[in-house]
Image (spheres, helix red, strand yellow):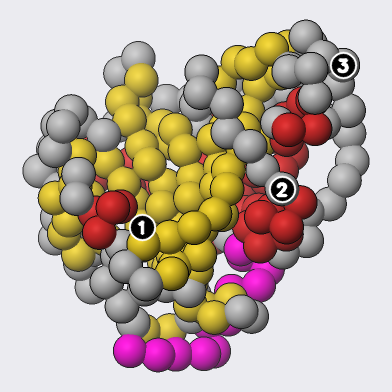
Amino acid sequence: MKRLLASSLAFALLLAACGGGEREAPPTPSPSPAAPAAPTSRCPDPDPGFCAFALELEQALQRGDPEFFLRNARYEDVNCPPEPHEVEACVGKPAGAAAQGIAMSALTVVGSGTVGEGTLASAVTYRSSLTNLFRNAQPQQADRFGDGSARVYAVGLAKETGRKRSIVVTAILPRGRTAIHFTSDRVQGKWVIVSVAQVSPHPNSLPAHMTAGYDWKMWGP
């Protein structure tokens, strides 16, 4: 596994307020309910199974339900490095200890690209980031992208594999419009989230290096 490094500043941007607390084992991904026979008009993707997953994700956003995202995530195994603090999921663990986490990154748009850092984050940190998203979204605010609630904005199909998808969620947070990319893949017959990237401020157009490998379609009204 390629190790991703993170600074406390990057995760302050990603989580806004990441609470401490004890570590817990990541939940086991569970199958999603049966997929509809065909995609709905809201979901522009041709894969009905993915559309079912994306629609469930949208409903979880509307409920403010972080547990959906934890249940439907793929966690990677890692042996903690000699400096365990370099991998967020290893904080508080000795070097060589086993840990699990999901790839997360916090990116800032600069010109036509982004800068930022990432890490393998524990389930606790992942839950904290989602809880803060739901707590801090400002539905009463609005801009040319729409209101400030957390909602699905677009989906992208990876050109290289023809299988991976990126679900872009957007929301207005206290520091402005933000986009969150939930990269998803089909693992053992079910769709799961494999990585998360927060991009702020939400760009007028998605950065080229994040879009070049995807065919993008807007989510329906």
Measure how far apart labels 1 and 3 are at the Cα level.
36 Å
Given residues 7 and 173, the one toward you in this image is 7
User: In the drawing, does residue 34 fall left or right of residue 47?
Assistant: right
Residue 67 seen in the figure:
no
The amino acid on which the numbered mark 2 sits, given as a three-letter code, is Ser
Quarter location, residue 15: bottom right
User: In the drawing, does residue 165 fall left or right of residue 192?
Assistant: left
Residue 127 seen in the figure:
yes
Instruction: Sort mark 2 into few (<14), some (14-19) or many (20+) by Cα contacts within 10 Å.
Output: some
Q: Is residue 82 magenta?
A: no
Q: Which residue is mark 3?
A: 94
For the point 79% across and 17% down, the residue is: 82
Measure how far apart labels 3 and 2 are at the Cα level.
19 Å
Place of residue 144 in the rendered image (x, y in percent of width and height, measured from the top left): 33, 89
Instruction: Sort mark 3 into few (<14), some (14-19) or many (20+) by Cα contacts within 10 Å.
Output: some
Given residues 130 and 29, the one toward you in this image is 130
* Image quadrant in which the C terminus is located: bottom left
Range covered by the magenta-colored residues: 132-144
118 w.r.t. 23: above or below: below
Given residues 216 and 151, the one toward you in this image is 216
Place of residue 86 in the rendered image (x, y in percent of width and height, measured from the top left): 73, 33
The amino acid on which the numbered mark 1 sits, given as a three-letter code, is Val
Instruction: Give the numbered dot on residue 168.
Output: 1
The amino acid on which the numbered mark 3 sits, given as a three-letter code, is Pro
Instruction: Give the numbered dot on residue 7.
Output: 2
SS at circle 3: loop
Of label 3 and label 2, which has the lower sequence position? 2
SS at circle 2: loop
Place of residue 202 in the rendered image (x, y in percent of width and height, measured from the top left): 42, 72
Quarter location, residue 213: top left
116 w.r.t. 28: above or below: below
